[in-house]
């Protein structure tokens, strides 16, 4: 009898801790249970226009959240891109259970490339994977996401970067480059081979929030760890993430997010930008300050309407640039909402957002 009671107590406690852990995870990302078609909750959005003329948003969520719209104004849910969740990811990334972060979407060589992030909060035991599809139109007989496995993996307390927040950019010679990163020693860029998956060189830091290199020894010092929502945070103080590179005219433009996401009313995200004539930098702001030394012009951030705006992507459709992001809205108690603005370039060649 005592054994049975003890067993029941153990089961009850395990369920209780599991529920608390799930609740903690949900609190780190926006609640998507309430969906408004014209003002959707979304986190880390990227966008593409499919063969059917519709716009598709891919974002953080279980198996990569997917939305579609015919006008960028009214949205509906589509089936998640990663279904089922890749087995390699759950096997190799401790704590990852399918809640997939910060994807990237682009079209090259006759196929859509969807890069995605597998990780857990405050750790850099992470991986960037790749899935491909012939079409974004879910009604097409050719529609099928096929997982291609990992592209790059970072190892906890071994690597000085975090393999999340991917963005693919192809240079004028047709060479693919992957930029990525969050905290640790900042934003990285690495050349890929023409298969869009195999690394073809070493990673290089192109943006930091701090003005100096963050060493691995410093990051591995337990005295620098913090506790948030019961989790040990090993990321350090280099609060920069979410890189996105575009080419306009003679410059490549690097957008990154400074400061903190995912905290609702305590979020402080802001989007900064720099530019370079070379895809791998150095990127500098309008004052000439290198981004790897903390430089960057603020494009948008905390305001009377928003606690923060960040995790930016940008696209040109029919000659018009669009800035795509998520914003923590003050009137909605810090919920992360889809944020799309038209973007232009001023006479000095710097991006500006329309009101």
Image: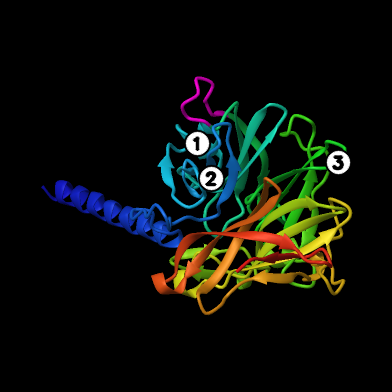
Residue 277 seen in render: yes
What is the secondary structure assignment of the residue under circle 3?
loop
Q: Distance between the residues labelled 3 and 1?
A: 29 Å
Q: How many labels does the image show?
A: 3
User: In this orientation, does residue 185 appear?
Assistant: no
Please give left or right for residue 193 compared with residue 81 in the image.
Answer: right
- Mark closest to the chain's N terminus, 3 or 2: 2
Q: Residue under circle 2?
A: 58
* Viewer-closest of 8 and 312: 312
| Position of residue 111 in the picture relative to residue 274 (left or right) | left
Corner quadrant of residue 128: top right
Cα distance in 3D space between marks 3 and 2: 26 Å
Residue 273 sits in quarter: bottom right
Q: Give the range drawn in magenta.
A: 137-146
Q: Which mark is residue 108?
A: none
Residue that label 1 marks = 81
């Amino acid at each position: 009898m005592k054994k049975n009671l003890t067993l029941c107590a153990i089961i009850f406690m395990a369920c209780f801790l599991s529920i608390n852990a799930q609740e903690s995870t949900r609190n780190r990302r926006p609640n998507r249970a309430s969906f408004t078609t014209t003002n959707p909750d979304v986190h880390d959005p990227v966008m593409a226009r499919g063969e059917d003329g519709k716009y598709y948003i891919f974002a953080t969520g279980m198996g990569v959240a997917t939305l579609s719209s015919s006008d960028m104004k009214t949205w509906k849910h589509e089936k998640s891109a990663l279904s089922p969740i890749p087995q390699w990811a759950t096997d190799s990334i401790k704590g990852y259970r399918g809640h997939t972060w910060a994807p990237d979407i682009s079209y090259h060589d006759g196929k859509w490339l969807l890069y995605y992030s597998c990780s857990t909060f405050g750790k850099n035991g992470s991986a960037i994977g790749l899935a491909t599809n012939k079409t974004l139109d879910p009604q097409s007989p050719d529609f099928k996401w096929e997982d291609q496995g990992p592209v790059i993996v970072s190892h906890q307390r071994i690597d000085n970067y975090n393999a999340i927040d991917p963005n693919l950019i192809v240079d004028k010679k047709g060479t693919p480059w992957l930029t990525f990163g969050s905290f640790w020693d900042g934003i990285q860029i690495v050349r890929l081979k023409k298969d869009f998956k195999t690394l073809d060189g070493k990673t290089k830091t192109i943006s930091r929030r701090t003005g100096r290199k963050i060493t691995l020894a410093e990051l591995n010092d337990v005295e620098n760890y913090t506790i948030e929502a019961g989790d040990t945070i090993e990321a350090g103080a280099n609060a920069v993430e979410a890189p996105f590179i575009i080419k306009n005219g003679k410059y490549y433009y690097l957008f990154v997010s400074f400061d903190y996401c995912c905290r609702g009313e305590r979020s402080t995200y802001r989007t900064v930008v720099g530019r370079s004539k070379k895809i791998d930098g150095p990127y500098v702001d309008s004052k000439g300050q290198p981004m790897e030394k903390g430089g960057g012009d603020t494009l948008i951030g905390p305001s009377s309407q928003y606690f923060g705006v960040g995790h930016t992507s940008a696209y040109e459709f029919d000659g018009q640039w669009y800035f795509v992001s998520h914003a923590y809205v003050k009137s909605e108690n810090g919920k992360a909402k889809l944020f799309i603005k038209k973007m232009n370039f001023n006479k000095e060649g710097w991006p500006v957002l329309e009101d």
